[in-house]
Structure formats: C-alpha cells, structure tokens
Amino acid sequence: MGVILEVKNLTKKFAGLTAVNDMSFEIQRGEFVGLIGPNGAGKTTIFNVISGLEKPNSGSIRFDGRDITGMKPHKIVNLGLVRTFQLVRSFKFMTLLDNINVSCLSPRGKEIAKEYGIDEYSSTILGSVGLIDKARLPPVILPHGDLRKLQIGKALGTNPQLLLLDEPFSGLSHEEAVDITELIESLHSDGVTVFVTGHVLRELMGLVPRVIAMHQGKFIADGPPKEVANNKIVLEAYLGRGGTFA
Amino acid sequence: MTQKLIEDLLSFLVSAVIQGSIYSLLALGFSLVYGVGGILNQAHGAFYVIATYIMYVFINGLAGVGFTLGLIFSLGITTIIGGLIYLVLIKPLKESHVSVVIVTFAFAFFIEYLVGILVDRIPHKIEDYFIYFGASERFFTVFGVDIQYQEILIFIVATLLVILITLFIKKSKLGKSIRAVAQDSEAAELMGINVDKILAYTLMISAFLAAIAAIINGPLGTVTPYAGWPILINSFAIVVLGGLGSLPGSVLGAYILAFASRFTQSFINPIFGALIPIVVIVIMLIIRPRGIFGKKEID
Amino acid sequence: MKKRKDLKTVLNDFKSYLRFWIKTFRGQVTVLCLIGLAILPFITTNTYIIGIFNTFMIYTIFAASWDFLAGYVGQVSFGHAIFLGVSAYVTAFTVKFFLFPWWFALILGAFFAVLFGLIVGVPSLRLKGPYLALGTLSMSLILYELFKMSSLGLLWEATFPGTELFGTTGIGQIIIFTDIPQIFYIVIFIIMCVVVVFLTHFVKSNTGTILKAIRDDETGAKASGINTTKYKVIAFMISGFIAGIAGGLFTFRHTGVNPGIFQPLYSFYAIIMAALGGIATISGSALGAFIFVFLGEILRLLGDNPNITGTIGGFVEPIFVFSIILIIIIRFAEHGLLKPALERLKSLWDLILGR
C-alpha cells in the first residue's frame, strides 16, 4: 500500500487571512477519505495548494513519494493527482467528447488513450460516467448533475492515481447525488484513491470510511465518520456556525 | 573637464526629473484604471493627444485669453471623453476583456486620425507659456546649464498633483470607494457602491491627469497625432516596473524609467536609449511580473 | 475498442469530407471565389487591379495568422507588425545584398520574425492577463523607432558599406523573382490557399482542440494536465511564421520596405480584417481582407478626388473610417460579418432558385 499523499505543516495566507493553518495529514494508496468543514473552513484552498493552483506560504506536500510543493499544476496532474472544481468548469464552446479529449491529450492521459484512439478512449470514459448519448453536445445546455459527471470524466481522462473531488454534491438533486455517489464508489473500487470534500457530514457519512475535519484553516479531527461526528470540537465548529449536521 | 561633466550631469538630472514628472502623471492614471477596473486602456495615449491639440489650437490661435480657454477646454473635454469612453465603449463590453482592449485600441486610432483631419498631420510646437505671458526669456542659467521656467513649472505642478491625487485616494469618500472597488469589486457592490460610477470616475481621473501632463509638457514636446503611442508604451513599461495597480509603484517606476532612459541616451548611446522601455518590459515580465510593489500573483 | 485509424482511412475520410463540403453552399461559394481569383490575372493585364488583388491575398494571409492566434487560442497580439516588418526586412536584405532565392529569403524572413516575436512573446505568454497585447505593441514600436534612426542607418552603412538597413528610406529596389505578373500572382495565390487550408484543418486537429481549450478556460486546461504555456508559445510561433510569410511577400509586392511597416497601424490592419470577417473563422479573414482592401481603396480614391476637399474631405481617410467601423462591429456584431453574409447570400440564392 503505502502513503500516496503526505501533507506536512501546510500554511496558506491571503492578505492577512490565514486560510490554511499548519495542516498535516496522510492518505494511504487506495483509501477513500472525506474532508469536511463548514463553508470557509479552507477546504478548497487546501485543494488549490495541493493541486498547484496556489503556492503555500510554508509546509510541504509529497505525492507518491515526490515533493510536489510549489510544482506547476499541469505537472502535478501528469504525476497522477487530479482535482475537480466546486464551481463547475468546462470548455464551453466544445463538445463533451472534445472536453474529455483534452485530458486524454495530456502527456499522462495520452500514454493510455493513444492505444485505443483518442476519440474512442474519450467515448468510453463518457460511457462510464453516463454521458455517452450527449457526446456531441456542448456543456452549456447540460443540467448541473451532468456537468459534475463531465468534470469527473475529464479527470478520468488523465488516468489519475489520486482524485481530489471538491464538493461534488453541492447543488445536486437527490437523484443526481445518488448517481454521482455510485460513480465515485465505482471509481474507488477500480483502485483510484479518492479524497472528497463536503460541508454536509451526512453526505459523506455513508460513503467514506474515514473523515478529516477542519475549521477556520485548522485541523480538528481525523477518524471514522461516527467518531468525528461526535467529536466535541467538531460539534462546536458546526453548531456554533449554524451549519447543517448529521 | 570637470566643468563639462558637471554641466552634463546637471543637464541629465534636470531632463530625467522632468521626464519622470510627466510620466508619473501618465503612469498614475494608467495604473489606477488597471488597478480599479482591470482595464489596460489602450486609449490612454489618446487622452494626451486630445489635450495637446486642444491646447495648441487655443494658444496658437488666440493671444491673451487663449491660454485660459485652452486650459479649461483641454482639461474639461479630455476628462469628459474619459468618462464617455467608459460609458460607451468599456461598460457595454465588460464581460469580454478582449473586446475592451480591441475597442480602446480602435479608439486610439480614431483620435490619432481625427486630430490629423481636424487640424493637420504636421508636427507643431506649442508656444512657451512664459513667453506667451510676456517673459523675455524662457530659461535661466545655473552652473552653465540652461533650465527652462517651463521645466520648473512641470516639476511643481506634477509633484503637486501626485500629492493631491494620493491624498484624494486616501482620504476622500470617492477615493475610499475607489480603493474598495480596486480590492474587490463584488464586495464593494454588496456594500452599496455603484461600481460603474466608480469606474467612470476612475477613467475620468486618468484622463484628467493625462491632460495635465499634456498641458504642462506642451511647450517642451511636439504636437503630433502620433504622440499617443510612445506614451502608451512608456505607461505600460512603468506600470509593469512599478507594479500594476500600485500608485507609489507608478511614481517610482516613472522616475526609474526616466533616469534609465536619459542616462542611456546621454552617456551611453541614444540608440540604446530608445530600447529602454522594451528591455524593462521583457526583463520585468521574466523576473518579477507583478512589479516592484505589485501584490497579486499573476503567474 | 479498436486500434487507431491508419493512413488509408484518414485519406478516405478526407475525400468524403471534401465530397460533402463541395455540396454545401459554403463550399460552393468558396470554390467559385477561388476559381474567380485564380483566373483573374489571365483575363486582365491591368497592373493596378492585379496589384490590389495581390495586396488582398497577402493581407488575407496576415489576417488569418492573427485570427488564428486570437480566435482559436484566445491570445490577442497588438504587435503583429513585428512579424510583418522583421520578415520584410530580412527578405529584402537577403534578396538584395546576398541574392538569396526568393523562397529561401521568405522562409528565413519568417524564421527571424518568429525569433523577434518570441523575445516579448515568451515572457508575456507565461503569464495570465493581457500582457501579450501591450508587450507586442511595445516591441513593434521600439522596432519602428530603431529602424527609423538615421544615425543607426549611417552607422550601418559605415560598418557594412554597400548595404542599407536602418534609416527612413529602408531597403528599396527589390527585384521580384519573376518578370511575369501572372506567375507572381499565382505564387501568392497558392501560398494563400495553403495557409488557409492548413490553418482551417489545424484547428480541428488534436492540437487545435488543446488550443481551443486554452482559449475557453486556461486554468481548466492546466487542471487537465496541459502545459498551457508550451502550447501558447507554439501557437504564437505558428501565427508569427505565417505573418512573416505575408511580410516577405509584402516586400516583393512593394519592391522594398521601410520602417513604416512596424507602425501600430499594420497591427491594427490585422485586427480590422479579422474582426470584419469574424474572429475565429479562418476563411472570414479573406472576407475581412477583401472588404478592407477594396473599401480602403475606394475611400482613398474618394480622398484624392479634387471635388472632395478640405476638412470634410479629410473624413474619408481610410483608417479613420475603419476605426469607427471596428468599434461598431465589436460593439454590435462580435462575430463578424462572414456568417451573416453567407446566410443572407444563401437565402437570396434559395429565393432565386425558387426554393
């Protein structure tokens, strides 16, 4: 097995605000981990720093044995670490197929995709996320749930070892959330390490065997969901801020 | 030998300070518009051209009252055009940065050719203001170097205005709103600030400063339609050097660029002097794109 | 999943694509225009007309190069004159003083154009934000000042006697590689077709998909593992090379070059033409260049007309008119005139055929 992601003393400040404050944790290869915290806790910022979109002020990140602190985002992706965005992004003026194609054309994605033909490989991915019948359509007309599936599909195109999913459930209807849950579970059982954030613990409770909790940039708990849900500090953080809970 | 050196040095110092003064006004306005609205206004040089030509037409056309009228119309019309550019060209296209940049670029050409049509394309000189008001000489001599009264005027007015604008931005209500929009336009809107109005005012301030620069530099510079371009380039170089959106950076950058330009021109080679802006741009973009005082990460 | 397509299938795909394209209205209009263009120098010997069409074709190449970069990669350059000018000068210089063959001078010119472009392009493209526009504009302006300098001109002639490079007169009396105007015309015509076909298909390739992704969402492209800087630089080089080819042809067309070619004006030309035809339609550049050249010529003739004089007459100045047109287009018709024009033509055509 082994440690696939090691975050040590990570700190990120923005003009006086400390968004991530001395966070440390480890994720093993093949794990399925959740990251929870109320809105503004710093979850997206941590993802931004890990994926290279932001540089940390101090601390280090090791992925698959390599120090990736401060590395450029595209290089990190090509090592096998991919993230999706809370605010869904897509290439608006291209077909869904082309959207996936882009990931398949990354150096890492191409290694696999070119064996089958880029278009064919992308089609398979679209099939696995349930969007194959919309392959020739542009993202602008898709419902929110489909766009989230598209994002996951785009991530898959890069052949990831570790998938960081930023709030994949936000804004989804119940059926859409169920779809996405099944998709993420099947990815995990295929061997991808999944690290997923959410601010509603209930969403993650039944999904992940382990949860890391953070509040105002700081680490507050790490363990099975039931334990974390009963942790005093976690309770304070959520109830004190009026956030939803289990 | 040393006499000549002192004279050359003094002459260099004077011209560098004067160029720095003029450019600090221009860079200040350019940087303000970028810092507040994220707009790299390609028509910035056009403001200077408009003000120059209005001044020229009045001063060289009318004796006596021409100066005052020229001053009023030059400042007034240029400032109004600054606001109009925002309302007519920039605001409707705000979702597309590309469009804004193209449309202001087109406007710069529109002005360049408009003044050429309304007046002519021949280079002209604006009459020295002191001579205009009856002075017998336009300069005085110090340590063997001729310093023009106009140059003293430039330095005083420019410095005054830099101080005024800085105080204005720091202390006045409008200035506070401007800073709020510069920091975070969405938050400012939520606080009840009319972001559109602020952006319009910012452009008007920028145009106003450019007009001042044009007026005080008038007699020293040349009246040509083409003058807008070197101004745009130098404003850009200064703002890249000093830090996009940083006001002290613009002033510092203006003087650094002026000194570097003049030094290279006087003591090394005029050919290299012309290259200074692009060298500054390329080097800064490579080693520190955010500029000396810039804060945002942009790479 | 099957293995990727082999060459035979690709060729067959292309052939059936052509067969399909010929049947479309757009395809037929294009073919008709191309035929018309191709036979022009054979049905008239009027050097003025042939000259205008030569300029039109050269400008099509220039506009297409800019349109590719701006419309498909999302990078706006205000200094495409750099490529035009550097290449024009290198071509002129090597042809006049080293008697290089024209095609070699052309390629060499385009190569040096790209080199100069990269000086400011690489630092700008690494960064987010609108640096490329002003960076390239600055470079072109500096080159304009540099090449205008008479002091530099004299220095050059002293160092390399018998040659000219700097100075307001530029390099003159270039001899075109052929005396026969038809050959010159057809060479330009072929180069234009090659460029347009290449760009049109390049943007549909895998690399084109990546470039379009960068245009649509650069951060998203990075998050998909794409080294966006590398691809932006590649696109910049392709655009610059093609613009350089236009520059070399420009030298031959005008039998010389002077520093004026580095003026912001020429960069502006590229933008006007691309915008007229529709940014992000390569073939639109041809329409844009056509309108620009011919409307510009009409305006110029009007301006020279002794009946239109004084200040009112001055308003007919082509650049003045085009700056207004460009502002109007960007404000009201961001996607250019090609598509609406084709649609109008098609409805007219349907009407005539009684459909």
Image (cartoon, rainbow, N blue to C red):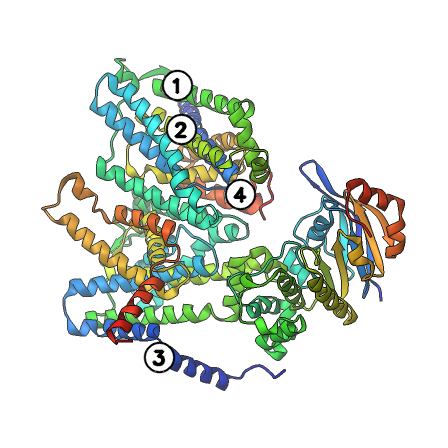
Question: C306 above or below B63?
Answer: below
Residue at disc 2, secondary structure: helix
Q: Pointer 4: what residue?
A: B284
Q: Which residue is denoted by mark 3 in the rendering?
A: C23
Query: Depth check: C87 or A78 in front?
Result: A78
Mark 2 is surrounded, within 10 Å at the Cα level, by few (under 14), some (14 to 19) or many (20 or more) other residues, namely: many
Q: Nearer the viewer, mark 3 or mark 1?
A: 3
**Left or right relative to C339: residue B132:** left
User: How far apart in space, not on screen, are marks 1 and 2 (Cα)?
Assistant: 21 Å
Label 1 sits on residue: B152
> Which x, y percent locates residue B225?
29, 38
Q: Quadrant of the C terminus of chain C?
A: bottom left
Do marks 1 and 2 both belong to one polypeptide chain? Answer: yes
Relative to A21, residue B69 above or below: above
Q: Earlier in the sequence, mark 2 or mark 4?
A: 2
Can you name the residue that lies furthest to the left here? C307
Which residue lies under the disc numbered 2? B208
